[in-house]
Image (cartoon, rainbow, N blue to C red):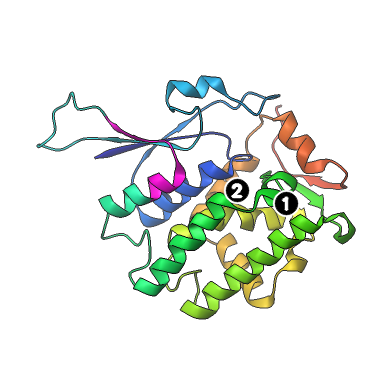
Amino acid sequence: MVYHLHITSKNYSSWSMRPWLLMRELGIPFEEHSAELISGSYRQPHWKAFSPLAHVPCLYDVANDSTSSSSDPPLILWESTAIVEHLAEAHPDKPVYPAVRAARAWARSATAEMHAGFATMREEMGMNVGLRVELAEEGVSGALGRDLRRVDELWEEGLRRFGGPWLAGGEFTAVDAFFAPVVLRTQTYVGAEKWLGERVRGYVKRMLEVEGVKEWIKLAVGEVGRETLHDEDSIRGRKLLADLRATEE
């Protein structure tokens, strides 16, 4: 099989990061296709060319074996949790999810919670890898505070129950990939780390040393494109401390 992963801007797209990082860290080869992110709109209808919902990520699994006809259509997975489940099924030798049953159940639940929850964090702390913005305590809404406390509670539970160094035990799995954009948010929004306990802060440090995470950050800050709506959402009502992103010469 040959995988084609369609994503968009590494600076702004948290959903693009999740399968990209998982496949990168587990050594599952793929060809990356980066779709243009048009500034000034939350909708990107031109993505319909590769995704049924015009969303990213979208994974194409192209048959490449002797039992398949060259005319067989690719398998298309246009939703992040479906991508993860497909990879777990296709690569039982890879720790997409933990081998231990209890850890696997917890990891699946936490991954699903990240996928379906944390709406206020997404809205008030959007992905913006190259910015540094002050998150003053008095500027944290009650709903955002609840999301931050839940992140701390959930990560603490996983690290304590399964012994670390990753959320569900000794191997990097899908649950770590799904929460990686939250780790990056703790860097963008300076002050968010105050909501995290000591053990969880240690996990953040380890995640920032993961090769795939470092590569993603490097590529994200190297992008020169700007999306005005995302930038405005990140900065609104806050002090901009730094913009680490590349600029066009």
Identified at 43% across, 48% down, the residue is 81
Magenta span:
74-84
Amino acid found under the numbered disc labelled 2 = Ile
For residue 91, which quarter of the picture? Answer: bottom left
Q: Which mark is residue 217?
A: 2
Q: Is 234 on the left or on the right of 107, as rendered?
A: right
Label 1 neighbour load within 10 Å: few <14, some 14-19, many 20+: many
Query: Which percent across, then down, holds residue 63?
Result: 21, 35
Who is closer to the viewer here, 112 or 220? Answer: 112
Position of the N terminus, as image quadrant, is top left
Residue 188 badge = 1
Q: Nearer the viewer, residue 211 or 124?
A: 124
- Above or below residue 207? Residue 79 is above
Q: Is residue 49 magenta?
A: no
Please say whether residue 12 is visible from this viewpoint.
Answer: yes
Disc marking residue 149: none
Quarter of the figure with the C terminus: top right
Q: Looking at the image, is 221 positioned above or below residue 153? A: above
List the single residue furthest toward the left.
67
Q: Gap between marks 1 and 2, in whole Å?
A: 11 Å
Answer whether residue 80 is magenta in the image: yes
The answer to which of marks 1 and 2 sits earlier in the sequence is 1
